[in-house]
Amino acid sequence: MTPESRLLADIRLALGQDERVVLWRNNTGTAMQDYGAAGLRPLRYGLAVGSSDLIGIVAPSGRFIALEVKTAKGRVTREQQQFLTLVEKMGGVARVVRSVDDAVRAVDAASEASK
């Protein structure tokens, strides 16, 4: 398991105990799909290019939250930053989180903003 995968698992475990938030793992990427006579073609999966690792809803307002999980040295791609910026622009909460504490603070911010 990579350090980022371990961090993601730890965050999911911690936030899974928080009744204020429901999160979904958002795997994104491209796989090759066999279309028979048409041959192999790329098939994109996930919410959108650059969409965050974890997406969810914070109670009681239903506010959207997007968490991009990175290790201390991990870098956010241009597409990931664009997604985070869009979420914030549209009224959601979007954060790059590098620890369980960062993730909890993001949920706290979303929860407080909904009051």
Image (spheres, rainbow, N blue to C red):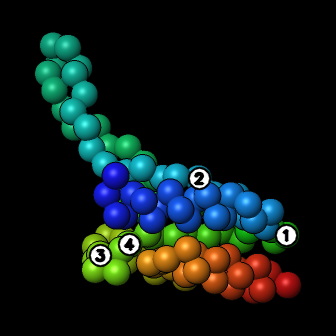
Which type of secondary structure does the marked residue at label 3 adopt? loop
The residue indicated by pointer 3 is: 74
Choose top left, top right, bottom left or bottom right for residue 42: top left
Instruction: Determine the residue positioned at 21% across, 33% down.
Output: 32
Q: Is residue 67 above or below residue 43?
A: below
Compared with residue 111, is residue 8 higher up or lower down, i.e. above or below? above
Report, in whole angstroms, how far the alpha carbon at label 3 lies from the one at label 4.
5 Å
Q: Which residue is mark 4?
A: 70
Please say if 88 is above or below 40: below
Say whether residue 14 is left or right of residue 83: right
Q: Which badge, 1 or 3, is on the more N-terminal residue?
A: 1
Is residue 60 found left or right of 72 in the rendered image?
Answer: right
Which quadrant, please, contains the C terminus? bottom right
Q: Which residue is mark 1?
A: 60
* Residues marked 3 and 4 touching at CB (< 8 Å): yes
Name the amino acid type tagged 1: Pro
Whether pointer 4 and pointer 2 mark residues with C-beta atoms closer than 8 Å, the reply is no
> Is label 4 or label 2 in front?
4
